[in-house]
Amino acid sequence: MKVRIVGIGMGPQHVTPEAAAALRSADYVVAASKGDDDGLLAARREVAAAYGLEVVAVADPERDRADPADYPGAVADWHAARVAAYAEVLGSRGGTAAFLVWGDPSLYDSTIRIVEQLADRLPLTYDVIAGISAPQLLAARHRIVLHPVGQPVHVTTARRLPEAVATGQRNIAVMLTGALDLAGLEDWSIWWGANLGTPSEALVAGTVREVLPEIEAARVRAKAAAGWVMDVYLLRAAP
Ligand SMILES: C[S@@+](CC[C@H](N)C(=O)[O-])C[C@H]1O[C@@H](n2cnc3c(N)ncnc32)[C@H](O)[C@@H]1O
């Protein structure tokens, strides 16, 4: 058995020739389904269809979000439930399965960790094909480099943004966002993007103080247009 973990960027236009070759070598696609209105599952289906691949949708197990104090524990339980569900599919079908990962598998995605666990249970080999990630596309759309010359860029989640600022990070890419809480960062610059690479893509850039209301309105519009919204932004402290 073989598993190919394929980064598909933000949709069919980002499937690289390397990813396309991996897809052509696969027998079927395994994809987590978060319900009927799962916009990302629809994107995966579109990519799979382009390569004539059947999509085996595996209902995503419920994740316990009640106790944020035990976030790692809740995620570990969720991963274990996903591993069990995927093991059943792979065990019964065999062959070469492709997991289509939104963006790149290296950023805020559990597929590699899940497949590592699958490989402990089943006789399989696996590889990873890189895709275009949301921060990369954000930078391209805004025509920027993610960091000033010779400086680092810190990639984190909105949840951990206060910690990043407190520890002195000055150039921060933020993913897994929620409501924008940028109090205290009014002088910072922000390059923001939502639903990148899709028809409802929205971009805003400027000083946080000046563009925050514009971002909030654009976020609402993107969600209304697509039925879902995912956004990513780069924050840079004033020099
Ligand atoms: C679970 S992570 C997956 C990231 C993905 N593996 C990547 O390489 O970009 C989802 C987060 O990525 C960002 N994201 C993913 N797709 C996006 C898009 N099309 N536009 C803007 N942000 C996106 C958002 O911050 C979202 O909360």
Image (cartoon, rainbow, N blue to C red):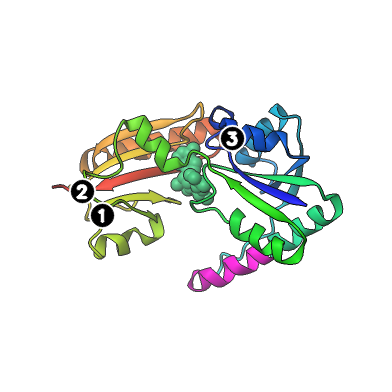
Spatial CA distance of label 3 from label 2 is 42 Å
Residue numbers of the magenta segment: 67-80
54 lies left or right of 215: right
Spatial CA distance of label 1 from label 2 is 7 Å
Label 3 SS: helix
Label 1 SS: loop
Mark 3 vs 2: CB contact within 8 A? no
Q: Nearer the viewer, residue 169 or 188?
A: 169
Compared to residue 181, the image places residue 196 above or below, namely above
Total residue callouts: 3
Between discs 3 and 2, the one toward the N terminus: 3
Residue behind mark 1: 183
Q: Residue furthest left?
A: 239
Q: Nearer the viewer, residue 33 or 6?
A: 6
The residue under the point 71% across, 66% down is 120
Mark 3 is on which residue type? Glu
Q: Nearer the viewer, residue 21 or 88?
A: 21
The residue under the point 48% across, 31% down is 197
Asked if the magenta segment contains residue 72, the reply would be yes
Asked if the magenta segment contains residue 75, the reply would be yes
Q: Which mark is residue 186?
A: 2
Q: Residues within 10 Å of mark 3 (few under 14, many from 20)?
A: few
Q: Which mark is residue 18?
A: 3
Q: Which label sits in the foreground, 1 or 3?
A: 3
Q: Which mark is residue 234?
A: none
Mark 1 vs 3: CB contact within 8 A? no
Mark 1 vs 2: CB contact within 8 A? yes
